[in-house]
Amino acid sequence: MVKTYREGPVGALLDEYERAADELKNVLSDIDSHHFLAIVDHETSDPDCVSVERILNHVVNSGYGYANLIRKQFGDALTEKIQAKPMQTPQDACLELDQMLHYTAETLENKMQITLEEILNNLIKVSWGQQYDFEQLLEHAIVHVLRHRRQIEKFKLRR
């Protein structure tokens, strides 16, 4: 099968976001429903990091949040407070990831040819206090998936 790559820097970032999500889905592929829902980290104070299910819920909800920040920045229509549907299995999580990525792809559809100047001049303030340009926010979204993929890989070692 021949891989199709999107055009431009925004297309490259979206391709890498999807690749990161595919790697995460691959990590989920051998987790059963019991281990997906089980509390693994009893020491963390972060409720989003106690189980694989909670991590995936956090990743999906964050992905929608990043897409909505971009939509707001560019005056595009958005769906406020999109939330992942309840997930009982890794397969549910994979479907939710795919839907979030589809929403993100729709967000970026009309921004594939954005110029470097437009990227640098579109600063987005995030809820945790930092300010990112458009490209940095997408890079953060990718690394967010990668960090949580690693976290789940470490959870799997505890079984």
Image (cartoon, helix red, strand yellow):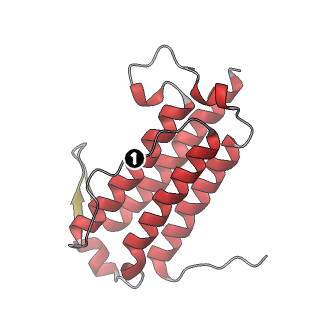
Question: In terms of image quadrants, where is residue 151?
Answer: top right
Q: For this view, does 153 lie left or right of residue 95?
A: right
Could you say which quadrant of the image residue 1 lies in?
bottom right
Residue drawn at (21%, 45%) of the image: 129
| SS type, badge 1 | helix
The residue at 46%/76% (across/down) is 9
Kind of residue at badge 1: Asn
The tally of labels here is 1
Q: Residue furthest right?
A: 1
- The vertical placement of 107 against 90, above or below, is below
Residue 61: image x %, image y %?
Answer: 39, 47
The x, y position of residue 48, in whole percent, is 42, 31
Density class for disc 1 (Cα within 10 Å; few <14, some 14-19, many ≥20) is some
Residue 31 versus residue 132: which sits nearer the camera?
31
Tell me the quarter of the image containing the C terminus. top right
Horizontal relation, residue 113 to residue 35: left or right: left
- Percent of width and height locating residue 89: 61, 37
Can you give x and y, in whole percent of width and height, for residue 100 in the image?
46, 57
Q: Is residue 119 above or below residue 41?
A: below
Q: Which residue is more in the foreground, 41 or 101?
A: 101
Q: Residue at x 65, y 26 (%)?
A: 35
| In-image side of 125 versus 133 (left or right) | left
Residue 110 sits in which quadrant?
bottom left
Q: Is residue 104 above or below residue 81?
A: below
Q: Which residue is mark 1?
A: 61
